[in-house]
Image (cartoon, helix red, strand yellow):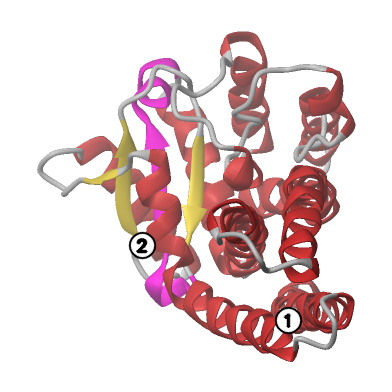
Amino acid sequence: MYSAIARNKRNTWFIIIGFVLVLGLIGVLAGWLAGNNWWITAFILVFAAGYATVQYFAASSEALAMAGAFPVTQAEAPRYYRLVENLCITTGTPMPKLYVVDDPAPNAFATGRTPEEASITVTTGLFELMTDRELEGVLAHELGHIRNYDIRVSLIVFGLVVAVGILADVFLRVAIFGGRGRGQAQWVFMVFGLVAAIVAPLLAGVVQASISRQREYLADATSAMTTRDPDGLASALAKLADHGRPLQKANTSMAHLWMADPLRPGGVARLFATHPAIPDRIARLQRMGGEF
C-alpha cells in the first residue's frame, strides 16, 4: 500500500515533466519546419510550462465544474455525511468536501491534490440505488483513492489531456483566422492542429487506461480493508453493472475519474476502457471475502 502511494507521488511529477518535454520537442520541430521561426517554439514551451503549473492547482475545480457537481452540507445530506465521517474516523483521514451531481446514473469520483484538499462526489442515482452497506463500500473506495494519492495523478492526467485539445484548437484558429501571407508557418499550424485534434482523443484513452485500471483494483482492496466487508462493495459493483447508464454530462477527458465507466459502450470505448471489467473486480473482492 505504501509503495503504491509513493509510486503515485512519483508518477505525478513524471507525467508533468514528460508532458512539458513532449510539447517542447513539438515546439522545436514546429519552429524548424516554419523556417526557424523560434517564436513558435517559445510559445509552445511557455504554454506547456504555464499550463502544467496551473493545472496542478486548478484541475480539481475544473473536474467538479465539468461534472456539474454542487457542494452539500451535513444538514442537506445527513446519510452521505455520516458514512464518510465514520470512514474518515476509522482511517484517520481528513474529512473531504462532499459534492453531489444531479444525475440518475449511479456513479462517484474523488478529486484533490492531497487528502487535506480532497472532495468526494456522488450522483443522486447512487443514493437511490445503494443500501447503506453498499454505499459505505463505494465511499470507502473513493476514500481509498484519496488515501493512495490516486486522485492527484488522475487530475494531472485529466488536465494535461485537456491541454492537448486546447493547443490543437489554438493552432487551428491561428491557421484559419491568422490572415494570408504567413506562408509555411500557417501551414505548420494547420498540420499540427489537425494532427493534435486527431491524436488527442486517442492519446487520452491510452494514457487514462494505462494508469486507471490498476488504480481501481487498489481502491477496491483499500475499501475492503477499511470496511472489512468486501462483499458490500462487490454487491454495489454488481448493481452498477446491472443498473449503470451513461452520465448526462459525460466527458471523455475525465472518464477515468469516475468509479464506473460514465461513457456509452462501443468498440473504441472497450479498446481504450479506463476501468477494469466489473466481473473481474467482483471476483477479486469475493476472493478477499474468503480471507477475512
Is residue 146 located in the magenta-colored stretch of the structure? no
Q: Residues within 10 Å of mark 1 (few under 14, many from 20)?
A: many
Q: Earlier in the sequence, mark 2 or mark 1?
A: 1
Residue hosting label 1: 20
- Residue at the outermost front position: 181
The answer to which image quadrant residue 129 occupies is top left
Along the viewing direction, whichever of 187 and 230 lies nearer the viewer:
187
Residue 181 pos. (x, y %): 66, 66
Q: Residue at x 82, y 51 (%)?
A: 195
Residue 128 pos. (x, y %): 36, 17
Along the viewing direction, whichever of 254 and 2 lies nearer the viewer:
254
Image position of 26 with respect to 96: above or below? below
Residue 99 pos. (x, y %): 31, 46
User: What span is colored magenta in the figure?
Assistant: 113-129
Q: Residue at x 47, y 19 (%)?
A: 105
Q: Amino acid at mark 2?
A: Pro
Q: Residues within 10 Å of mark 2 (few under 14, many from 20)?
A: many
Q: Residue at x 38, y 50 (%)?
A: 64
Left or right: 151 as drawn, with respect to 73:
right
The answer to which image quadrant residue 132 occupies is top left
Residue hosting label 2: 96
Q: Amino acid at mark 1?
A: Val
Q: From this viewpoint, is residue 292 visible?
A: no
Picture quarter with the N terminus: bottom right
